[in-house]
Image (tube, rainbow, N blue to C red):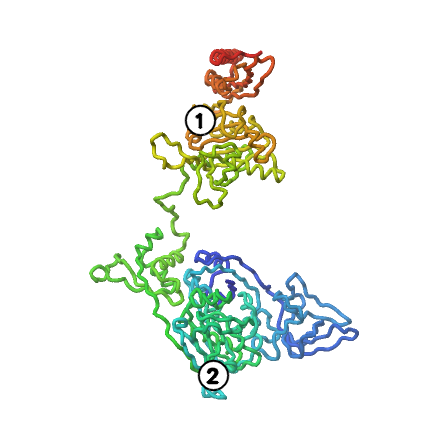
Amino acid sequence: MRVPLSWLRELLADAPPDDDLVRVLPTLGLAVESVERVGDPLDGVVVARVLDIAPIEGADKIRLVQVDAGGGEDDPVAVVCGAWNFAVGDLVPLATVGTVLPGDFQIAQRRLKGVTSNGMLCAADELGLGADHAGIFVLGRGSVDGLEPGRPFVAATGLGPDTVLDLEVNGNRPDCQSMIGVARDLAARFGLDVVRPEVLYPIVAEADIAGGAARPTVEIDAPEGCGRFLARVLTGVSVGPSPLWLARRVELAGMRAISNVVDVSNYVMLEWGQPNHAYDLAALPGRGLRVRWARGGERLVTLDGVDRTLSDSDLLICDAEDAPVGLAGVMGGASSEIGDATTDVLVELAWFDAMTVARTSKRLNLRSEASARFERGTDPEVLEEAADRFSTLLGASGVATVEGDVVVGEAPARTRVTLRPARVNALLGTTMGDDEIVGHLDALGFSVAGPLPGAGGAPASAGEVTAYDVTVPSWRPDSSAEIDLVEEVARLHGYDRIPRTVPVSSRTGRLTHHQRARRGLRQVVAGTGASEAWTTTFLSAGDVARVGLDIEGTLRVTNPLVADESQLRPSLLPGLLAAAAYNASHRQADLALFEIGRTFRRPPVAPGAEADRLPDEREELGILLAGRDAVAATEVWQAVAEGLGLAEVELVTAAAPGLHPTRCAQILVGGKPVGWVGEVDPAVVEAVGLTGRVGWVEARLDRLLAERPPVQLHPVSRFPSSDIDLAFEVVDDVPAAAVERTLRREGGELVVDTWLFDVYRGAPVAEGHRSLGFTVRFQAADRTLTDDEVATARTRLIDSVTSTHGATLRG
């Protein structure tokens, strides 16, 4: 909602500076989205009356204009002007010599075609008051109150600088969709009074109206949709432009100025939050209104020119002959629109059911400023005050109000709520006294009575008040329970004055140990350069057989989503191979994919045991390396093992379904099998449409993560390290991991790291043997190792490996 501060200040007595208002509004629940400064001081611009317009010899596009700038007709000011949209007698803005207009444009005395120009007559855009440059800004004609020649332009028109706030008004604050509502909140916070606009307008008796009765008739046939209805007639209307100050305020508030009657209607809605509608009384057959439910299929052309089909859930405003003339609370009809010929106006102000308006607005996809307010709830008691404001604003131009409003319906009783001071303090964490709580509510317009009787019906003694009886003001339909009043007290007390506390919960959300470990595993595998994939859980029998897995060991779904995909996957290998094949078909051949997912196998059944056991469901890790071999797969596994901090990791040569018979090893951690590493069988690779080698790692998460040791931190040595290389010739059956364990064990605290850097077969290594090359790093935590210490440790390592594994040290 756009709020011009000049408008707001008129409603507040002794309002504080703009910066204080902007600072306080968010603490009241009205967030300030933006602050816009509009207009300029326009010092030196005055009102002038055109006295004479004469041609200039030799010039056909400019004229010499004599104006009265406060000196009277005997002391005119000569100005050269190129605009042609004004005449003698018009009141126009004159920028006198020395004035600086917006854009840093300075007015100087100039000589044109032999004539001296002492100033400039201004267009609206030259004054920073819009984009209109079609001609001079004509303020009026003849004698207009307040627009005396020579009077400063800003003081005469009210079109000076202003500040416009864009406020975020939430759905639970319908009262603040009006200037009065915002002023109420600020007045309560600063301890100010809200200044009610003056009510002063001419009244004419019905008997004095020419042409017969002026009072309209009003009928409400749908009281559940319309609780109150006020109709008032204004006569002597002359439709034309609004006063400059009013039109500008309406536009600053975000609406378009149209005509005096329409602008006053919008002004009253913006100021009081009460939508209203003005009808051309002459266009209302029967000079009356009727509120009823629409009949399904009825049609109405609304003010936006759209022919709309109505349903029986829509509430209508009809004329006295039952023809629809408006959608209640949403938009009026085109048939009774205010026009240039309008002289008598019927003003409607009503209190409509919020849900009725909301349903119609949503069904027709028709949102209006009126429907936005009715949907949130309006004040049923404000109709008379809003009508008086309407009459006052139009009455300034001589429009008279016909005596005797027609009012149908009664405002509902105000809501009453029981408020417990102890509950207020308990919820807010404050220690406010009763007087302070009551004072906050009083300032906001809530009427507090009590205290309520204590136990046994006796009045509560001083300091022992348990509850108050609070009457909610009519403009706060959102407040209907004790918690709503607690929020009001908090708003006015100030959220910044309420101590901050961390809520205590009996259930705090957190990851389980397994979930944290699995998340860490994902990060480790992704760190090797693999991309995480998701593959389907359901496979066809052909998918299982194609990768060399046992179809008899799989589980079949009796009611599969796809008939050909009835097998639950026993491994992640088929899905990741299919993903790699798809990528290869799109020229992405070499890639690394991994997946963490569940696999399913038929449970083993022991002789004599029941066969209806649950499936063997496992959570597994699968890593597929397209275009890479078993060595690369081993390196990836080692990175994973190191990232998880696993100890006693060993690879033992073995065969697994779907993997290369001689390039495959079982993974042991702590002597327990957890998975496999190696290459996919070339026949399987060819069967799925791939080429080249494909590395593979798979591991069971339950076993893998169970072997993960607790994290232990060790100090980093400040002393230098020494590396030695050792190559041993061993029988092919001796695992490299076993040799590495021996090196670590025998090296003790001095061996900080070992790694295999070379595997060699061939001459001069004997048949059935291979050479394993290791790098061993020595480092002490408290000293620099001497050459003798390193040599002694080296000898101990060689002796241990040769004796334990029957190895021979290569030269």
Q: Is residue 391 visible?
A: no
Q: Is residue 766 above or below residue 77?
A: above
Which image quadrant for residue 71? bottom right
Q: Which residue is mark 2?
A: 286
Q: Toward the viewer: 631 or 255?
A: 631
Q: Is residue 799 visible?
A: yes
Q: Secondary structure at mark 1?
A: strand
Of circles 2 and 1, the one toward us is: 1
Q: Which residue is mark 1?
A: 673
Q: Is residue 550 above or below residue 780?
A: below
Q: Secondary structure at mark 2?
A: helix
Left or right? Give the position of 267 relative to 377.
Answer: right
Which image quadrant for residue 192? bottom left
Task: Inspect the image, locate mark 1, and give the three-letter code of the amino acid beneath it.
Answer: Pro
Q: Toward the viewer: 237 or 35?
A: 237
The picture places residue 168, in percent across and down from the top left corner, at 48, 59
